[in-house]
Amino acid sequence: MGVNMLRIILAVMLSLFYVHAAQVEELKWPKGETFLTFLQKNNIPSTVYYSLDKEEQELAAEIVAGIRYYELRSENSELEQVLIPIGEELQMHLLKNNEGKFFMEIIPIIYQEENHILALEIQNSPSVDILKATNNNALANEFAQSLKSTVNLRNLQKGDKLVVIYQQKRRLGKQFGTLKVDTSMIETGKKEHYVFSYKESYYDKDGKELESFLLASPVNYTRISSPFTLKRFHPILKTYRAHLGIDYAANIGTPVRSAGDGKVVFVGGKGGYGNTIEVSHDSSYKTLYAHLNGFAKGLRDGQRLKQGQVIGYVGNTGMSSGPHLHFGLYRNNTAINPASVVKIAKNSLSGKEYKEFLAYTDTLRDKVKKASVSDSTSKVEDNFSLSYPYPQEAKSM
């Protein structure tokens, strides 16, 4: 399918959305709300929740406070459908069957993916100038975050240059999800400083990892019983699934340790995840420890932790098919693969992986050089992608 055809499909979808705009409302998910309490608040039978399978109940526990979701109501304000994003690839779709009874299904999120290049001559500071050019706080913050181990941004001078190549999702005409920086470049004193995003970490031009946040394995386990997956289609059930963490099989009572220094931000029950702990770390990271048998004595919200400190014990609570630790890792509230960050020390790429890195970064460098010699500020590249379309979202929402 060509680029123009995809654009036509998206335009039709958006026009359908705005035709129903009077009936569709965009809302923010309230803090403390769960999928079960949402059902109860809207007089929907709780059997909708309790009939979900293990994976679906775990996904329901992934709803993030503040996430934007959509309600479709009839002319007499009766709730008809709801779309609730779970991460950036899948969403919970609450709707009625032919008998008028509610049920829930997991469907893909439809979005447009744009690749941007921003080139600027610094007038004030990178953050101020990026914000002025794009009105995008997330871009300004991520640019600074990517370069924090490479350049002291406070020492830059007026006339220095910056280039950033980044990806931004767009859903229903609005920015959606987490912005991803592919490369950042600062030119100061006629010297170029590059940072490249590669396999969910930042590297310098020589393939040395720059990310300072490291995780230790949170538990002594016997095996990985379920790996991390953002989105997969179940060929037998004919539905979408995701597993936003790693499951470590271990005996009940095995100590669970904080994967890094941080602060406890949640202790308690969390739907399908059972007894759960959430820990906030530096660099916008958060870790989650679920299905616990119990918590360390005295553990409380706001408590400061050291890496390796015992916080709980492996259990089988919530929707669990056997004793294990479900370990989740989030950056800016978006689930990422913990296996990409759990390591012993900083990595320097080598061998085949290093050759792949060089080929990848050579392409990005060429784009940076072309952008830096032009007078352009920001542009969207002429390549376009769309996640797998789902007719019901286009027709109904």
Image (spheres, rainbow, N blue to C red):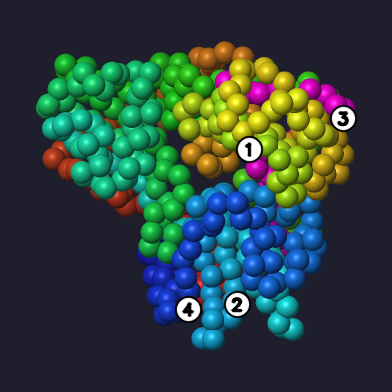
The residues bearing labels 3 and 2 have C-alpha atoms spaced at a distance of: 43 Å
Q: Label 3: state its secondary structure.
A: loop
Which of the marked residues, 1 or 3, is nearer the chain's N terminus? 3
Q: Label 4: state its secondary structure.
A: loop
- Report if the CB atoms under discs 3 and 2 are less than 8 Å apart: no
The residues bearing labels 3 and 4 have C-alpha atoms spaced at a distance of: 49 Å
32 above or below 118?
below
Q: Label 1: state its secondary structure.
A: strand
The label nearer to you, 1 versus 2, is 1
In the image, farthest residue toward the front: 298
The residues bearing labels 4 and 1 have C-alpha atoms spaced at a distance of: 36 Å
Is residue 371 shown to the viewer in this render? no
Res 30 quadrant in image: bottom right
- Which of the numbered marks, if any, corresponds to residue 80? 2
Residue annotated with mark 4: 23
**Going 75% across and 26% down the picture, which residue do you hit?**
296
Residue annotated with mark 3: 252
Res 82 quadrant in image: bottom right
Which of the marked residues, 3 or 4, is nearer the chain's N terminus? 4
User: Magenta part of the protein: which range?
Assistant: 238-261
Which of the marked residues, 1 or 2, is nearer the chain's N terminus? 2
**Going 63% across and 48% down the picture, which residue do you hit?**
62
Residue annotated with mark 1: 266
What residue type is disc 4 on? Gln
